[in-house]
Amino acid sequence: MGLSFYVRFRHLLPVLVCLVTILVFQSYWKTFSLLDLSSRFIGNNVTLQSNYSFQYEVENHEKEIHNFNQKILLDDSTQKVREFDEKHNIQHQRKGFPSKGTKGLNADWSIYHDNVKKSSNGSGIQSMEIDPQNKEKPQLLKTSLLGSSITMQPTSLTRLYSQLIQSFNSSSRKPKSSSQRDRELLAAKIEIENANVLLKSSGLHAPVYREVSKFSRSYELMERKLKVYIYREGEKPIFHQPKMRGIYASEGWFMKLMEGNKRFIVKDPKKAHLFYLPFSSQMLRANLSDNKKMEQYLDKYVNIIAGKYRFWNRTGGADHFLVACHDWASRITRQPMKNCIRSLCNANVAKGFQIGKDTTLPATYIHSVMNPLRKIAGKHPSERTILAFFAGSMHGYLRPILLKHWENKEPDMKIFGAMARDAEGKRIYMDYMNSSKYCICARGYEVYSPRIVEAIFSECVPVIISDNYVPPFFEVLKWEAFSVFVRERDVPNLRSILLSITEEKYLALHLGVKKVQQHFLWHKVPVKYDLFHMILHSIWNNRLSHIRLK
Ligand SMILES: *[C@@H]1O[C@H](CO)[C@@H](O)[C@H](O)[C@H]1NC(C)=O
Ligand SMILES: *[C@@H]1O[C@H](CO)[C@@H](O)[C@H](O)[C@H]1NC(C)=O
Ligand SMILES: *[C@@H]1O[C@H](CO)[C@@H](O)[C@H](O)[C@H]1NC(C)=O
Ligand SMILES: *[C@@H]1O[C@H](CO)[C@@H](O)[C@H](O)[C@H]1NC(C)=O
Ligand SMILES: *[C@@H]1O[C@H](CO)[C@@H](O)[C@H](O)[C@H]1NC(C)=O
Ligand SMILES: *[C@@H]1O[C@H](CO)[C@@H](O)[C@H](O)[C@H]1NC(C)=O
Ligand SMILES: *[C@@H]1O[C@H](CO)[C@@H](O)[C@H](O)[C@H]1NC(C)=O
């Protein structure tokens, strides 16, 4: 099967490349869906990370948290699971599953479902040919563009990137008055735009960046110039009390390292380019019962800040930022902090994440506060004998579909449900991460997963199956250089897509994974290019991109 696929693929490739090129240039911004077509063939190039014991706790947490949340918030994913279950008679272990519907049923569910039915076989060959679905796409997309809605089509990297460029190109609202700080930012922006030559000393691996010279210059300027003010207001435990462990630990680590930072913090807010709102979405969730109350709480806080200082009103919050990892953070900050730069784990463009303004916070499961920096190592590519690995609980609508197509289907596809949570299970899991070429990071209830960072740590090329998810540091990292993105509808073609990636390309992806590891590591004392700095850089980057003078 592999060979015949390969032959057909090679025959088709030149034709497809031409076709795609023509179509793309014909319809440029309007019809990105055609680019998606090309990425289906190449496998939509994606990436991920890690430590086995991490993973286990993650699974526990997700389940616990979501069971708890279901009663209160019936969101799109829950709706999708229920529909999927009804149509496929799937039973799952979760109890207390809500029975009645919610608003906002995603259009991409039905698209997704149609496609699963149409491409029924695992070979993926039929769906690699130009099928009638693709003819319908431009029309679908047109409507969605007009209505400025992005939920009509599952999103690929290519389209996300186009949205990003559009966002940076769109004019944002001007501040009520200009400030010396804005002028400094504008000067930095001009300097970055003119950065063409990479400083040799940077040591960065160019292929994993969109524009390595710009990133390098931007990073240096951030280190030299950026000043951040942290509001003192806000009571513990919701404010100023970082939680350093668990699945939402990214927000806690950032808060801790930011509040303790010497280089970036200023005591005088007049000297600041950016203003940090230091709350924990996890503590907010733990302290208040429902998301309406959480939203009101934040609203009150914003009123205090806006009444007491003049900075909020000057830009409407556009130079303010928050860093929040809880699933609900996007929802509860959408109104009170709508202009702020939000660094969010749940970076779902179909649920209010604004690409270009908001930025993706990587979810990192922290097991040990004393030692956030795990030993990062994986087997050499030649020792990775398994093509693809996944194990996890059946959270969300997608994973049951993944298992339906791939559990016990092919010897090189190790696709499982939840594994035993004992020491032996953990060892097996770690062995798989270590011995696989590709680690499948399929969305759960929400689009993000700590698996991405875990795969990167274990040097397993991440395969992200999560439509509408914007990967971390998307503004600067070229994810297609160290990961593979597969659309949800292409689960039936997963194996063909992975097999179509040449050994040479795989080795490049693997090398890319090793080169980006430094960006996903927490250090108790931050070091250059580490996770703390990358999060701050993504915020700085988005602020610069939208800076306007009066
Ligand atoms: C995937 O990688 C190939 C080879 O590097 C590249 O030509 C192609 O444009 C990439 N596809 C996407 C969708 O980025
Ligand atoms: C799917 O592929 C298998 C071989 O891999 C074949 O036996 C089967 O008939 C195919 N089913 C469909 C629906 O094409
Ligand atoms: C950005 O905007 C300028 C002028 O508004 C336009 O000429 C240019 O084509 C735009 N670029 C992109 C990538 O949209
Ligand atoms: C957090 O919850 C406790 C009780 O659970 C309550 O007394 C306290 O006021 C809450 N804190 C905030 C800031 O809401
Ligand atoms: C900012 O605007 C709000 C609402 O318009 C107002 O209540 C507040 O007093 C303003 N803040 C300052 C410092 O002027
Ligand atoms: C994973 O974490 C455990 C402790 O929790 C540690 O003993 C082990 O060495 C770690 N493995 C890797 C690959 O980092
Ligand atoms: C993964 O492989 C590397 C290299 O062979 C080895 O050092 C490491 O201990 C392995 N980790 C696990 C968890 O098996």
Image: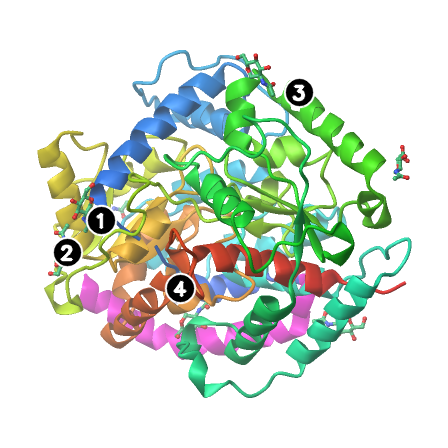
Pointer 4 residue Cβ closer than 8 Å to ligand 1? yes
Q: Nearer the viewer, mark 1 or mark 3?
A: 3
Residue that numbered label 2 is attached to: 435
The spot of residue 332 in percent (x, y) is 64, 30
Secondary structure under badge 2?
Answer: helix
480 magenta-colored? no
Q: Nearer the viewer, mark 2 or mark 4?
A: 2
The amino acid beneath tag 1 is Phe
- In-image side of 194 versus 155 (left or right): right
Pointer 3 residue Cβ closer than 8 Å to ligand 4? no
Q: Evaluate if marks 1 and 2 touch, with contact meaning CB atoms under 8 Å apart.
A: yes
Q: Earlier in the sequence, mark 1 or mark 4?
A: 4
Q: Evaluate if marks 3 and 4 touch, with contact meaning CB atoms under 8 Å apart.
A: no
Alpha carbon separation for disc pair 2 and 3:
46 Å
Check the picture and name the quadrant holding the N terminus. bottom left
The spot of residue 483 in percent (x, y) is 37, 61
The amino acid beneath tag 4 is Asn
Q: Earlier in the sequence, mark 3 or mark 4?
A: 4
Residue that numbered label 1 is attached to: 389
| On screen, residue 147 above or below 541 | above
Residue that numbered label 3 is attached to: 292
